[in-house]
Every structure is written in C-alpha cells, then in structure tokens.
Amino acid sequence: MGYRSYRRFSLNAIWVLIAINVVLFIATTIDRDLIFLLGLNPVSFPARPWTIVSNLFVHSGLWHIIANMLALYFFGTYLSRLVGERKFLLVYFGGGILGNIVYILLASPFSIAVGASGAIFALGGALAVMVPRLRVFLFPIPAPIPLWIAVIGGFFVLILLPNVAWQAHLGGLVLGLITGYFFRRKKRYFF
C-alpha cells in the first residue's frame, strides 16, 4: 500500500504579507481615511515617515490587491525557494522602499502612492535576471513567454496607464535587477 505525501500548509513570510495586505484592504474599504494616513504623500512624508513602509500594505481597489497578491505569491514563492526567506524579504522591502524613495523624488508632491507594486517589481526583476528563460503565462497572451519579457514588458505597459506610480515600479525593478545579478553571480540557476 502506497502513501501519498501531501505538502502541508505552512505559515511563511509570503502568507503573512498577504494576510496583512488583505486585512488592511478590508480596513481601508471600511474607512477610506486610512488611505491618507497610511499612503505615501511626498509633501507630508517628513511628518509621517512610517508611510514609506505602510503604503506597501494599502491598495486602491479590488483588482489592484488581487494582481499584487497573485504576483507576490508566485514571484515570492519562487524567489524564496531560490535564495531563502531572509533574502526574499530583503528584496521585497528593499524594492518597496527604494521604489518609494524614487516616488518621493520624482512624483507630484501632492500625490498619494499606495500598493506593493514596487516590491513586486523587485521580486520580478530579481527573477528576470536569475532565471530569464523561465516561461510564464501572462494574461491575455495565450502562450508562455520568457519571464524577463513578462517583467520588463509588464513595466512598460503599466507606466502607460493613468494613475500608476511608475516611479515606484521603476525603483523596485532597478533594485530587483541589481540583486538578481548578485544572487546569480553567487550561484548559477539553470531553469
């Protein structure tokens, strides 16, 4: 008689990040003023420095959080398996914070940035360098494409959309590409 081994659910950093995002999404849906308290506004940043991190957990709408949490789950799981949870968290928060710094420097001082997109693009950028030929499906394209094309192409498509904090995406992507380069130099990945 054979036994199947099932992978048990384990609470890891990715699930904790997703849970925090979902809880704050529900909270900001109930009380919209929380977006102004937790979102990053360049002009009020000196008085509210926590927003350089808190805005990574606040999303502007249902599709925004769904897209970011799906990308966090898939990119995060893959990167965490390659480099470990500690380095995954460094890339995630480093990309989010650098993205927010670029946003502060380049965006309108009266705008508000919310979302984990800078952190997500850091994960995608690192993976694009480490495993560039990994093939992924990207909706609505019906065939798999190389990861590096999906990440870089996704960046250029997103910056064309209105109300997208391209500065945060750019900062996160740059950090991800750099860390991916250093991770790849230390260990070769053949995927």
Image (cartoon, rainbow, N blue to C red):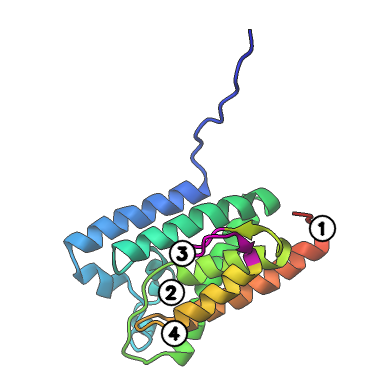
Point out residue 73 in the picture as x, y percentages from the top left corner.
Answer: 50, 52
Q: Quadrant of residue 2?
A: top right
Residue found farthest to the front: 142
Disc 2 or disc 3, which is closer to the eye? 3
Q: Are marks 2 and 4 in contact (CB under 8 Å)?
A: no
Q: Which amino acid type is marked by label 4? A: Leu
| Among numbered discs 2 and 1, the one appearing first in the sequence | 2
Q: Which residue is under mark 4?
A: 160
Q: Which residue carries the number 1 mark?
A: 188
Amino acid type at circle 2 is Ile
For disc 3, the marked residue is 140
Say which mark, if any, is on residue 177. none
Q: Which residues are magenta?
A: 137-147
Amino acid tagged 3: Pro
- Real-space CA distance between mark 1 and mark 3, rounded to the nearest whole angstrom: 31 Å
Residue drawn at 42 percent across, 52 percent down: 18
Q: Classify the position of the C terminus by image quarter.
A: bottom right
For this view, does 129 lie left or right of residue 86? right
Query: How many numbered circles does the render carry?
Result: 4
Task: Answer whether residue 142 is magenta in the image.
Answer: yes
Q: Earlier in the sequence, mark 1 or mark 3?
A: 3
Q: Which residue is mark 2?
A: 52
* Crowd class of label 3 (few under 14; some 14 to 19; many from 20; radius 10 Å): few
Marks 1 & 3, CB-CB < 8 Å contact: no
> Gap between marks 2 and 4, in whole Å?
24 Å
Task: Say if mark 4 contacts mark 1, CB within 8 Å.
Answer: no
The numbered mark, 4 or 3, whose residue comes first in the sequence reads 3
